[in-house]
Amino acid sequence: MNATETTQTFFDAYAQSLLDRDAAAIAQLYAVPALILFPGQSVPVTSAEQTEQFFDSSFEQYHGIAEANFDITIVAEADHSIWADVTWTYGGAPTERFIYQLVLADDAWKIAVLTPLSV
């Protein structure tokens, strides 16, 4: 599979897990360790449970959202890593944008670094 197909498949699964409010499934899509780079704050992810707890506590902000679309731009790729600029659209308007670094870990693609961007 090429980087475009890999990221499309990955984010199809990620979006479905978000819509299902399945924090355990989302947690399996993050590498351990991983790094979340919020403005002014870096959050090291040291366990799948940490990711699961984060998403469990944040699902309320997506209340009423039943559809999630995304647009992916591959920024860079290597055999072991893909950098994807992803804009998420909820309710018909672009709402969130992130750079994801996906890495091949345990024979599966997982998020290793997540950086929010301006929409």
Image (cartoon, rainbow, N blue to C red):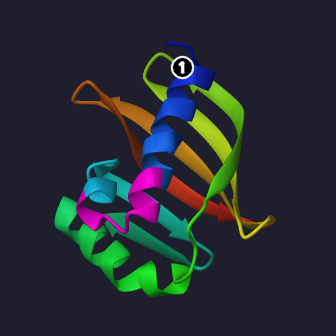
Give the overall secondary structure of the magenta segment: helix
Residue at mark 1? 78
- State left or right for residue 4 relative to residue 63: right
Q: Can the viewer see residue 92?
A: yes
Name the one closer to the observer, 72 or 80.
Answer: 72
The quadrant where residue 39 appears: bottom right
Q: Give the position of the C terminus as an image quadrant.
A: bottom right
Q: Can the viewer see residue 47?
A: no
Q: Where is residue 104 shown, x and y percent of the image? A: 36, 28
Q: Is residue 21 magenta?
A: yes
The answer to whether residue 83 is above or below residue 114 is: above
- Count the numbered circles shown: 1
Q: Is residue 49 magenta?
A: no
Q: Which residues are magenta?
A: 16-24
Residue depicted at x 26% and y 24%: 107
The quadrant where residue 7 appears: top right
Q: Secondary structure at mark 1?
A: strand
Residue depicted at x 66% and y 53%: 69
Q: Where is residue 45 shown, x and y percent of the image? A: 31, 63
The answer to whether residue 63 is above or below residue 66 is: below
Q: Where is residue 6 shown, x and y percent of the image? A: 51, 25
Residue depicted at x 56% and y 81%: 64
- State left or right for residue 16 relative to residue 39: left
The quadrant where residue 2 appears: top right
Residue depicted at x 37% and y 69%: 21
Q: Amino acid at mark 1?
A: Ala
Circle 1 Cα neighbour tier, 10 Å, few/some/many (<14 / 14–19 / ≥20): few
The answer to whether residue 64 is above or below residue 21 is: below
Name the one closer to the observer, 18 or 83.
Answer: 18
The answer to whether residue 71 is above or below residue 74 is: below
